[in-house]
Amino acid sequence: MDWAENRVRLARASRFYLVYGKGLSSRQIVDAVRDGAHDVVDLSENRERWQQALESAAQAQALWWQLYGAQGEMDERKLVGRSQAMQALRDSIQRIGPTDATVLIMGESGTGKELVAESIHDTSGRAPFVTVNCAAIPAELMESELFGAEKGAFTGAVRNKPGLVEEAAGGTLFLDEIGELALNLQPKLLRFLETRRARRVGSTKEYVSEVRVISATNRDLRAESQKGEFRLDLFYRLSEVIQNTAPLRSRPEDIPDLSRVFLVGAAVRLGKNFDSMEPELISRMQQYSWPGNVRELRQNIERMAIYYDGPVMRSTWWTPPLPPEKQVTKHPFVPQHREQKNSADPFREMSRNPFPPRTLNRMEKLEYARRLLEESGGDLTWTASQLGIHPTTLYRWRKDGKV
Ligand SMILES: Nc1ncnc2c1ncn2[C@@H]1O[C@H](COP(=O)(O)OP(=O)(O)OP(=O)(O)O)[C@@H](O)[C@H]1O
């Protein structure tokens, strides 16, 4: 392999290393950094380090190619999935991307709404892409964040501050969780959408900003608008095109591709050698309902990759959480889950015993603790008693993010 030629590709594939030497333009470096590379190695300075970086990047690339072919089509930040719903979604993105239509993306949490917004933007030829999370910005600051503020407009406005709609000029403004936008701000956003004009807080001068607006919600905004909980006229303005994202349970055929991408991503990030999953694991995952959708799938795979070692991800490492109605929240000394017979699931088997077998290694113990915590609705005392450890140990594990 000609390393010099493959440098940028390797760097991008690994997302870990940006390796550069002679012949790489600063533009390529900037692009690779933007794509996620976060270690810069200079060939001229340290040969050994350079070799190490190349080896890690090459391993990652080899793994990627082995699984997905040389095109590198599968990317954690691209929409993955071959179900009909995903194909229709991609087709729709290609159609609506290049138009100026406002798009409202509706779907359950974790179904990929933000990814869809980015894909629409990517096909639009616009720049930049500016995201505003309406749930994350306090209501009293939202107007100045969105539309800007003049110096002295309120305590704390110590200088003129452009609004996010100004920063997004020429590009796309993505309003995530739009259902959380305060009612008193809704007429202002509506006016902006109708005229593309706005005014900074504390200013009398209007400015114009040509932005394309995409928004997303996991609430039923149509129903809420009809009940007067969200302005109906704003709903119509935001939704020239409505794009729905399908829940994962309705497209289990996407699970193999999605899990492979997440597995490889996790392996590369953690520096582990995972390269496949037991077919039994995939088919069990396809039977689970995934209330947290693709995000939940990703988190489950990443968690297994953290706790266990490869190269094969095993079916026995994974137990779907019990549905909420079966979870025990109060004094769960005889929890329902112990009554269930499911011998395929070692953790459930174990949870019939008052204490887990001594043979559990540390990793398994942490996984077991996590599972018991889930099933008991977070009851630290009971879970600790099941594990035979002191509750403060469990509390510490939890604080350290181990369970
Ligand atoms: N089709 C997909 N292909 C690859 N990754 C996906 C896909 N759908 C979702 N994801 C991943 O799942 C996670 C959740 O996706 P995203 O944040 O876009 O969901 P969302 O619908 O916007 O969720 P929320 O409503 O909670 O904000 C992200 O890590 C995203 O990369």
Image (spheres, helix red, strand yellow):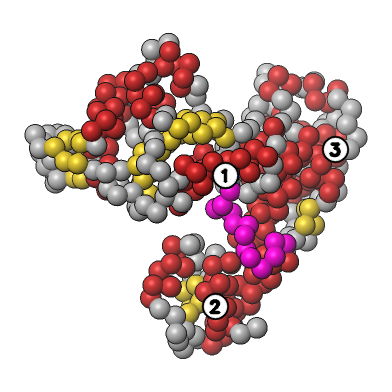
Q: Which residue is mark 1?
A: 91
Q: Main secondary structure of the magenta part?
A: loop
Q: Earlier in the sequence, mark 3 or mark 2?
A: 2
Q: Residue furthest top?
A: 227
Q: Which residue is mark 3?
A: 345
Figure quadrant, ligand 1: top right
Quick one: label 3, few (<14), some, or many (20+) residues within 10 Å? Answer: some
Are the two marked residues, 1 and 3, in contact with CB atoms closer than 8 angstroms? no
Residue 367: image location, x then y, percent: 73, 43
Q: Which residue is mark 2?
A: 7
Residues at marks 3 and 2, CA–CA distance in whole angstroms: 45 Å
Q: Earlier in the sequence, mark 2 or mark 1?
A: 2
Q: Earlier in the sequence, mark 1 or mark 3?
A: 1
What's drawn in magenta, residue-wise?
67-79
Residue drawn at x 81%, y 41% is 283
Q: Is residue 228 left or right of residue 329?
A: left
Are the two marked residues, 3 and 2, in contact with CB atoms closer than 8 angstroms? no
Type of amino acid under label 3? Asp
The C terminus: image quadrant:
top right
Q: Quadrant of residue 110?
A: top right
Type of amino acid under label 2? Arg
Quick one: label 2, few (<14), some, or many (20+) residues within 10 Å? Answer: many
